[in-house]
Amino acid sequence: MEIEVLEKNDVNMRLLIRGVDTPFVNALRRTVLAEVPCMAIDEVVIIENSSVLQDEIIAHRLGLIPLKTDLNGYNLPEECPCKSEFGCNLCRVSLTLDAEAKEGTRTVYSGELISENPDIVPVSDKIPIVKLVKEQKLKLEAYARLGKGKKHAKWQPVSMCTYKYYPQIKIDSKRCDACGKCVEICPRKVLTKNVNKIEVRDLIVCTLCQDCMDVCPQNPPAIDVSWDENTFIFNLESTGALPPKRIITEAIKILDKRLKEFIKHVKVKTREKS
Amino acid sequence: MIIPVRCFTCGKLIGDKWEEFARRVKAGEEPGEVLDSLEIKRYCCRRMLLSHVEIIDEILRFYEEAEKRKEARNQYY
Ligand code: SF4
Ligand code: SF4
Ligand SMILES: [Zn+2]
Ligand SMILES: [Zn+2]
């Protein structure tokens, strides 16, 4: 297996993975979606709410706010040595909110949540939680915990995690008369016309739709789009909870652990048989 | 009612981008271009902002009116 980083910033990452098969990349993708833990508000105690939104709606909105996560400092509640339903300092972070509209109508933003741990804060300070008119009040205490995407989507560290085959575009320059129809129809502007030749401008963005093949007047088409079944473009967009690199390394660690466990069970079973 | 925190379909955070989007569109910019500049690429997230109506503002007006009346009454007595 060979991995090349095509693009990386603080939320997006695009990898080129060579020499693997679909089950492997799909396992990686599903691990990222369902098994990599991150922090989200899980329980809310409403002390006062005279806003126009019900308690449940506010609690739901709070739950969906992505929180910057510290995976090293916290335990999953089910793995925490405290064994308490309520949680301890190692598996729970409390955030408080006390907002009142004194002057007139105003919006309460996620930045007003005060966290007991300054590292576990909303990824953005500008997410509206509710709007209050004069004299209305919202006071609450929220508890954030680590969780996994398989239980609730708010614990998914990514807002996108996809893969696709690596495209291969071949243009038969002998039969191509450079009519430019394929350039025109391509929805991703993959192809360009350079004097009397069709060239591939940006191979990575090709969606393998094969519209260019259908539109080609030559029979068979002078352009051929296929894909390499053992090379994948892996795309990942973090919600901001964890850096993309950490999400991937964490997913690989979890996948490795689960596979080892699986092999152990298979071995036990075969020994029982013999 | 109020802008959702995340995209219904993919889960991308969009709540924090609504105010800038609404302000710039009101100022006359092309909505599609504003979405591009906010780096909202997928159409599931784009429709979240494009089709949103902030109804909470309409509801708040009732409470604002009630508040005003209460103040006027206090002044009168
Ligand atoms: S397969 Fe589709 S996206 Fe790819 S080059 Fe042809 S028309 Fe463009
Ligand atoms: S449509 Fe076919 S013939 Fe026309 S430029 Fe493209 S590949 Fe060449
Ligand atoms: Zn604990
Ligand atoms: Zn979306």
Image (spheres, rainbow, N blue to C red):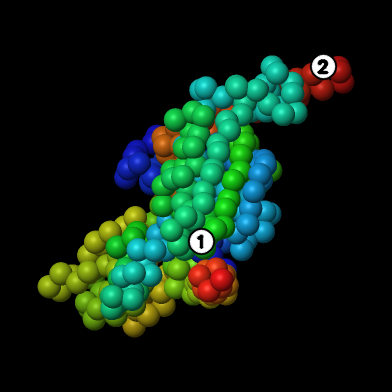
Asked if A225 appears above or below A249 in the picture, the reply is below
**Residue A236 in picture, x, y percent from top left:** 45, 47
- Residue at the right extreme of this rendering: A273
Which residue appears at 19% of the width and 72% of the height? A193
- Mark yes or no: residue A130 visible: yes
In front of the other: A258 or A142: A142
Q: Secondary structure at mark 2?
A: helix
In the image, taking residue A113 as reference, residue A198 lies left or right, namely left
In the image, taking residue B31 as reference, residue A149 lies left or right, namely right
**Residue A60 in picture, x, y percent from top left:** 63, 52
- Residue at the front extreme of this rendering: B77
Which residue appears at 44% of the width and 73% of the height? B50
- Mark yes or no: residue A163 visible: no
**Residue A91 in picture, x, y percent from top left:** 62, 26
In front of the other: A227 or A78: A78
Which residue appears at 34% of the width and 69% of the height? B23
Asked if A116 appears above or below A244 in the picture, the reply is above
**Residue B76 in picture, x, y percent from top left:** 53, 74
Q: Secondary structure at mark 1?
A: loop
Amino acid type of the residue that numbered disc 1 sits on in the rendered structure: Lys
For the N terminus of chain A, the quadrant is: top left
Q: Looking at the rendered structure, which numbered label has been put on residue A134?
A: 1
Q: Which residue is the site of mark 2?
A: A271
Question: Of label 1 and label 2, which has the lower sequence position?
Answer: 1
In the image, taking residue A33 as reference, residue B32 lies left or right, namely left
